[in-house]
Image (cartoon, helix red, strand yellow):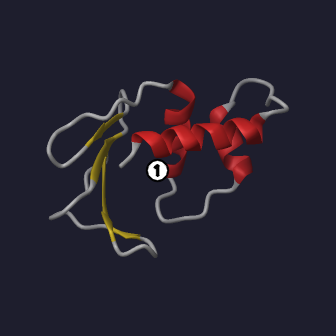
Amino acid sequence: MSGSIVWITGAGRAGFAYDEREWVLLFHVLGPVEIRTPDGVVLDARARKPITVLTALLSQVNAWTPVDRLIAATWPEQATPASAEANLKTYIWQLRRILP
C-alpha cells in the first residue's frame, strides 16, 4: 500500500480486505481527494463536507468510527451545529450515491 492510496476489495458482505492485485476503488487522499474506479473513471466527489467525512472514515479503515469523531472531523474549528448528526446522515447518504 502507498501512503496516498487505500486498496479495498470486497471480502464478501461481511467486511473488506486489502489486496494490491485487485481493487474496487482507488482513493487518493493526499492533496485533492480523488476516487477512481478500476477502469480509470474519476468519480464526482467535489462536495466538501461529504469528502471530509469520507477522509475521516478512510483514516480509520476497518474500524468502527464514533459519531463524535466524525463530528469533530467535519466541524473542527467551528461550533458544532445542533443538526450535526442529521447532517452526517445526509453526507453519508450523498457518499453512498457517489460510491458504487
Please determine whether, in this image, residue 40 is positioned above or below residue 62: above
Marker count (numbered): 1
The percent coordinates of residue 28 (x first, y second) are 31, 39
- SS at mark 1? helix
Image-based side of 37 in relation to 44, left or right: left
Q: Is residue 65 visible?
A: yes
* Spot occupied by residue 56 in the image (x, y as percentages of width and height): 54, 45
Horizontal side of 17 relative to 19 (left or right) equals: right
Residue lying at 42% horizontally and 25% vertically, measured from the top left: 46
Q: Residue at x 20, y 37 (%)?
A: 41
Residue at point 80% right, 29% down? 81
Above or below 80: residue 11 = below
**Would residue 71 be found to the left or right of residue 57 on screen?**
right
From the top left corner, tell me how far across and down residue 79 is, in percent.
80, 26
Residue farthest to the right, as pictured: 82
**In which quadrant of the rendered view does residue 85 lie?**
top right
Which residue is found at the position 59% from the left and 37% from the top? Answer: 91
Q: Residue 23's x, y, as percent? A: 23, 59
> Is the N terminus in the top left, top right, bottom left or bottom right quadrant?
bottom left
Residue 55, can we see it? Answer: no
Specify few, some or many for label 1: CA neighbours under 10 Å numbering under 14, 14-19, or 20 or more: some
Name the residue nearer the viewer: 10 or 76. 10
Give the residue pinned by disc 1. Answer: 58
Q: Amino acid at mark 1?
A: Leu
Residue 58 lies left or right of residue 25; in this view the side is right
